[in-house]
Image: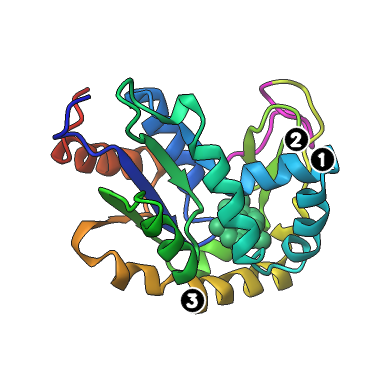
Amino acid sequence: MNPRIAQKIILVGAPGAGKGTVAKGLVDRFGLIHLSTGDMLRAAVVAGTDVGMLAKSFMDRGALVPDEVMVRLISDRVQAKDCRNTDGSPRFLLDGFPRTLPQADALATEGLGPDLVLFIDVPNESVVRRLSGRRTCPACGSVHHIEFAPPLADGICDRCGGTLVHRSDDHDATIRKRLDAFAVQTAPLVQRYGSVIEKVDGNLPPEVVLKAAVAVMRRYGFAT
Ligand code: AMP
């Protein structure tokens, strides 16, 4: 392990800020393990686990899943070998966690405080436009947009031919609630992580946002 390279990286941003897209670009480039709590919860919902059934009721109404559930989920996951360097030290890219100050406290208590926090900043009106037009493919995870990235055939995923869905939490009223949750519960993290936070303008084309995020990663020791 190279100690000069940031090992514990967190992506923070409002829903629809493009965290998933940035994460994918960084993972492809730098070989990081991507831990998206939203993806983990959606998989748990599909699998019908206890966590999934509990989480669904919160997710469907745009509310955050209780801290203790999320902390347990992530604490278990980061123990796995794929989130560790050969010397056992942690290495991960967290997307969507922590989302509250108590979650950040729990991470710090476990000695997993971040070396770098990328804050993808996007105004609310852009988020509403992005999310209400977003169509996702449950089969392969691809994301389309009815206005910005329409599929070749209506309702069909370009990549795998799956049926695209409008996520239940991507409808207007729920989007507003998710934005409120972000402003009240998640935005205070930006203050908390003051010394390691790097703001990236997320209101630009995806390739420009990724380029800016890559530039920050380089400053934190990553080579491409
Ligand atoms: P995302 O795909 O990251 O926007 O997450 C979708 C939904 O999953 C959120 O609106 C929350 O209901 C839930 N969720 C994801 N991560 C967290 C977290 N760290 N804390 C609480 N709820 C979460």
- Whether residue 131 appears in this view of the structure is no
Q: In this view, does 206 lie to the left or right of 42?
A: left
Magenta stretch encompasses residue 156? yes
- Type of residue at label 2? Pro
State if disc 1 and disc 2 touch (CB < 8 Å): yes
Residue 54 vertical position relative to residue 141 in the rendered view, above or below:
below
The rendered magenta stretch, by its main secondary structure, is classed as loop
The residue labelled by disc 1 is: 46
In front: mark 2 or mark 1? 1
Q: What element carries label 2?
A: loop
The residue labelled by disc 2 is: 138
Start-end of magenta stretch: 149-159
Q: Quadrant of ligand 1?
A: bottom right
Callout 3 crowding tier (Cα within 10 Å): few <14, some 14–19, many ≥20: few
Q: In this view, does 182 lie to the left or right of 150?
A: left
User: Residue 189 sits in which quadrant?
Assistant: bottom left
- Type of residue at label 1? Val
Give the colour scheme shown.
Answer: rainbow
Residue 9 appears at what percent x and percent y? 34, 44
Point out the image quarter for the C terminus: top left
User: Residue 120 sits in which quadrant?
Assistant: bottom left
- Whether residue 210 appears in this view of the structure is yes
- Type of residue at label 3? Ala
The residue labelled by disc 3 is: 183
Residue at the image position 75 percent from the left and 35 percent from the top: 138
Upstream in sequence: badge 2 or badge 1? 1
Residue 101 appears at what percent x and percent y? 44, 70
The answer to which of 8 and 166 lies nearer the viewer is 8
The answer to which of 137 and 195 lies nearer the viewer is 195
The answer to which of 92 and 187 lies nearer the viewer is 92
